[in-house]
Amino acid sequence: MNRETLRRTLTGAAIGGGLFGGLALLQAMRSGAPFPGVLQPVLVVAVIGLTVGGLAGPLVGQVWARRRRG
């Protein structure tokens, strides 16, 4: 795996995990549920986001690079 693909994978995973986990946490806070009760579902959603982001990161990065090059 080359450096660029690895960088895009890690960036995508970080963005996906943060986005999915952040949205799940926001929804949990809005529902008023106690934090210990929602911690596991929030973490599960964050792991799903890490996976989706890690898989989509290289694809989106390649498209983005091609568009920038013209």
Image (tube, rainbow, N blue to C red):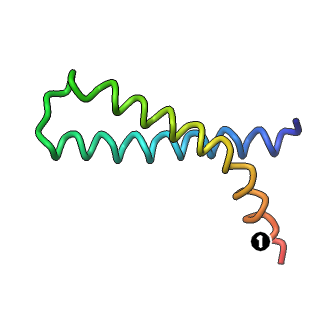
Q: Residues within 10 Å of mark 1 (few under 14, many from 20)?
A: few
Quadrant in which the N terminus is drawn: top right
The residue singled out by tag 1 in the image is: 68
Q: Would you place residue 52 above or below residue 61 in this image? A: above
Amino acid tagged 1: Arg
Using residue 21 as the reference point, say whether residue 30 is left or right of it.
left
Residue at (82, 68) in percent of width and height: 66
Foreground pick, 3 / 45: 45
Residue at (62, 46) in percent of width and height: 12
Residue at (70, 58) in percent of width and height: 60
Using residue 36 as the reference point, say whether residue 2 is left or right of it.
right
Q: Position of residue 37 (x, y in %)?
A: 21, 24
Q: Would you place residue 39 above or below residue 49 in this image? A: above
Quadrant in which the C terminus is drawn: bottom right
Task: Return the residue found at the far bottom.
Answer: 70
Residue at (63, 44) in percent of width and height: 11
Task: Return the residue found at the far left.
Answer: 32
Q: Position of residue 34 (x, y in %)?
A: 14, 28
Q: Position of residue 27 (x, y in %)?
A: 25, 46
Q: Position of residue 9 (x, y in %)?
A: 70, 41
- Local secondary structure at mark 1: helix
Quadrant of res 28: top left
Using residue 23 as the reference point, say whether residue 66 is left or right of it.
right
